[in-house]
Amino acid sequence: MLRRALVYVLLSIAAFVSVFPFFWMIVGTTNTSADIIRGKASFGSAFFDNAATFFTQVDALRVFWNSAVIAIVGTVLTLAISSLAGYSFEMFRSKVRERIFALLLLLLSIPFAALMVPLFVMFAQAKLVNTYVAVILPTVASIFIIFYFRQATKAFPSELRDAAKIDGLKEWQIFLYVYLPVMRSTYAAATIIIFMANWNNYLWPLIVLQTAENKTITLIVSALTSAYTPDYGMILFGTVLATLPTLIIFFLLQRRFVEGMLGAVK
């Protein structure tokens, strides 16, 4: 009994630590900057003032459109390319397969900061700086997602693939009509991971997106904090807006996300 009580106490503390920043962020949208600096933790009456200030200073529709295009297109392309690679690494056996895969995993040890300069030079020479393409392309072949799909594909029943081959299906048909429906939980989990990474991406878009009309919501909210006297209520309002899409995606796919992370195959 004591052990169970201790577990509940620890879980309650962990839940509080996890949820409190979100609570503080929501409460902050209703308070003035002065109230937030004083540490006020109750709801105020400045919500509409903060919203009006934010929409006055920020072209919200434009920056949300930029973020949505980058996140959605990047997610779709990453899912298509990385899942194909993960499927191929597991299904097609060859002598050099493991060496190539080991090399890919080794590349994970290279920090992105070491790649920024050559990437920027490459996109500058291709005249793609300050475009969506420059932000999306470096992310579409994600080594982590390739690894994730390969590990998930290990649970894919080989009997289904063999039966599909006997029925005369080609490899691309097996992938589209057999593999994708069976692995939908894996795709849901990967969708959440990739979408959140693309939506919250900050460093690389900061480098390649050089005009205000192409900047994402993450960059704009960050820029608001650099003012001489930041309006924290307005900033927290923008932060809440920037958080909503990822929350919506997560809650829509949360059941599949859990199944995918646990490796469930149905």
Image (cartoon, rainbow, N blue to C red):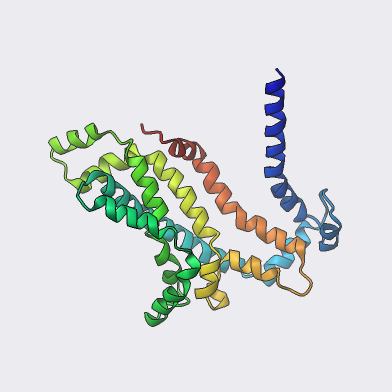
Q: Nearer the viewer, residue 186 or 9?
A: 9
Q: Nearer the viewer, residue 105 or 257?
A: 105
Q: Quadrant of the N terminus?
A: top right
Q: Residue at x 43, y 60 (%)?
A: 74
In which quadrant of the rendered view does residue 3 lie?
top right
Task: Name the side, left or right, on which 82 lies relative to 220.
Answer: left
Q: Is residue 53 above or below residue 184?
A: below
Q: Quadrant of the C terminus?
A: top left
Is residue 81 at all visible to an observer of this figure? no
Label tally: 0
Task: Name the side, left or right, on which 7 lies relative to 45.
Answer: left
Q: Position of residue 48 (x, y in %)?
A: 76, 59
Q: Position of residue 12 (x, y in %)?
A: 71, 34
Q: Position of residue 53 (x, y in %)?
A: 74, 67
Q: Position of residue 165 (x, y in %)?
A: 15, 38
In which quadrant of the rendered view does residue 51 lie?
bottom right
Q: Nearer the viewer, residue 96 or 60?
A: 96
Q: Residue at x 28, y 50 (%)?
A: 98
Q: Nearer the viewer, residue 89 or 255?
A: 89
In which quadrant of the rendered view does residue 7 lie?
top right
Is residue 131 at all visible to an observer of this figure? yes
Task: Name the side, left or right, on which 88 lies relative to 1.
Answer: left
Q: Is residue 72 above or below residue 147?
A: below
Q: Residue at x 45, y 44 (%)?
A: 189
